[in-house]
């Protein structure tokens, strides 16, 4: 009696789900998952980038590599720690595409640049190079106060330019520690051709030759480093928001977004579609082709803004401020807004004023 039933099941047409439907189901599941509940490890391009930088270290005789961990926003290394924070959303191709679609774009070459720079910090701290007299003579006093806002000399040839290409203009001039990290990154990058590129930059070349001498000739970064402090500030396993909440893509219409957009477009110009344009008198207007992404600009100053706003404004929640800043970043990306190099300080003031107003307005409405 079982055979007819069995035959019926075999004759029933097999139902297959469309691949697009499967992808959508997987996407929705990902968006609704808390970040701390994701099982993340570097995959795809990120894994390749970390492997490449590690191989570059080995080829230069460096036997120590920092621990690259998946954590909160941006690339950074805690002061005098040896672990490098890598944004959790670059962990695999799916998340990488998500951040490129909804926050701002990362390219493979940029990630390699950030990793080399942060690796320079980690090695400096691990082997305590900053304590050396010749390091201080070359780069300056490591204990000098760190400035979030600085006024670089754009014509100086005393400093290398590396993250400059990622929109972090004249970053080596910010602090002796950044001067070292930028010089190290240029030295480590096999495509930099630093001897040729900086042959006419006497002071910058001397810094690169110093890096070359203490690492390759003296072997200053071989063996077990004296400092092994990890310094994991916020691994992804401590981020309680869902993926959708983090990127603010819950597909809920937010009436405030139109106002945010209006204010941002008052502050930042759009990237021009071509190299320049002419005004009525025939002069070439400033091009925004090589200007920094406004989203990246906000990201670079996020910690400063969150710290200042939470200190100035009573009853403010740092997480709310961080979410608000991510909304601004997403809008800047969508509208292709940029910051011209020579107006960064001015735009930071404008951004701080606007952010303060909107955070205060939000608290007022919630308490009303």
Image (tube, helix red, strand yellow):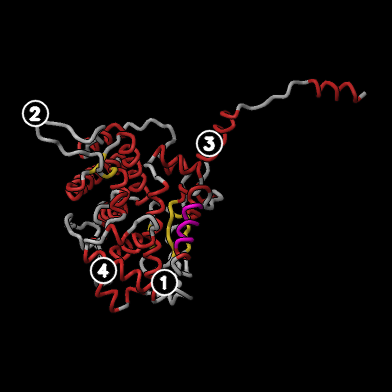
In the rendered image, which residue does mark 1 sit on? 126
Residue 23: % across, % down = 56, 33
Label 4 element class? helix
Label 3 element class? helix
Residue located at (38% from left, 42% from top): 105
In the rendered image, which residue does mark 3 sit on? 27
Pick whichever, 100 or 354, lies toward us.
Answer: 100
How many residues crowd mark 4 within 10 Å: few (<14), some (14–19), many (20+)?
A: some
Say whether residue 252 is left or right of residue 177: right
The reply to whether the magenta stretch includes residue 152 is no
- Gap in Å between the C-alphas at discs 2 and 1? 57 Å
Name the front one of labels 3 and 1: 1
Q: Earlier in the sequence, mark 2 or mark 4?
A: 4
Principal SS element in the magenta part? helix
The reply to whether the magenta stretch includes residue 50 is yes
Name the mark on residue 280.
2
Res. 115 image quadrant: bottom left
Residue located at (35% from left, 33% from top): 254
């Amino acid at each position: 009696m079982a055979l007819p039933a069995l035959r019926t099941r075999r004759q029933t047409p097999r139902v297959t789900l469309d691949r697009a439907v499967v992808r959508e189901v997987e996407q929705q599941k990902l968006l609704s998952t808390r970040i701390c509940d994701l099982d993340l490890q570097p995959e795809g391009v990120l894994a390749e980038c970390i492997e490449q930088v590690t191989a570059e270290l080995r080829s230069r005789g460096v036997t120590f590599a920092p621990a690259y961990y998946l954590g909160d926003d941006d690339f950074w290394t805690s002061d005098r720690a040896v672990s490098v924070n890598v944004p959790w959303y670059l962990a695999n191709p799916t998340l990488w595409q998500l951040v490129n679609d909804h926050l701002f774009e990362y390219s493979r070459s940029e990630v390699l640049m950030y990793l080399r720079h942060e690796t320079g910090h980690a090695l400096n701290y691990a082997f305590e190079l900053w304590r050396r007299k010749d390091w201080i003579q070359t780069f300056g006093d490591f204990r000098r106060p760190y400035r979030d806002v600085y006024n670089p000399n754009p014509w100086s040839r005393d400093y290398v330019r590396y993250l400059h290409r990622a929109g972090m203009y004249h970053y080596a001039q910010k602090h002796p520690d950044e001067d070292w990290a930028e010089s190290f990154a240029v030295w480590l990058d096999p495509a930099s051709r630093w001897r040729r590129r900086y042959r006419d930059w006497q002071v910058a070349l001397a810094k690169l030759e110093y890096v070359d001498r203490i690492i390759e000739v003296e072997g200053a970064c071989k063996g077990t480093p004296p400092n092994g402090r990890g310094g994991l500030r916020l691994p992804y396993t401590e981020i309680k928001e869902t993926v959708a909440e983090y990127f603010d893509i819950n597909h809920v219409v937010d009436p405030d977004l139109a106002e945010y957009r209006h204010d941002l477009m008052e502050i930042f110009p759009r990237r021009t579609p071509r190299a320049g344009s002419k005004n009525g008198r025939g002069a070439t207007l400033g091009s925004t082709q090589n200007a920094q992404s406004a989203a990246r600009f906000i990201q670079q100053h996020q910690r400063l803004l969150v710290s200042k706003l939470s200190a100035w404004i009573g009853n403010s929640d740092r997480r709310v401020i961080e979410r608000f800043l991510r909304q601004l970043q997403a809008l800047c990306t969508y509208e292709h807004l940029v910051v011209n190099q020579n107006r960064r300080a001015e735009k930071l003031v404008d951004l701080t004023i606007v952010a303060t107003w909107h955070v205060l307005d939000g608290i007022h409405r919630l308490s009303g």
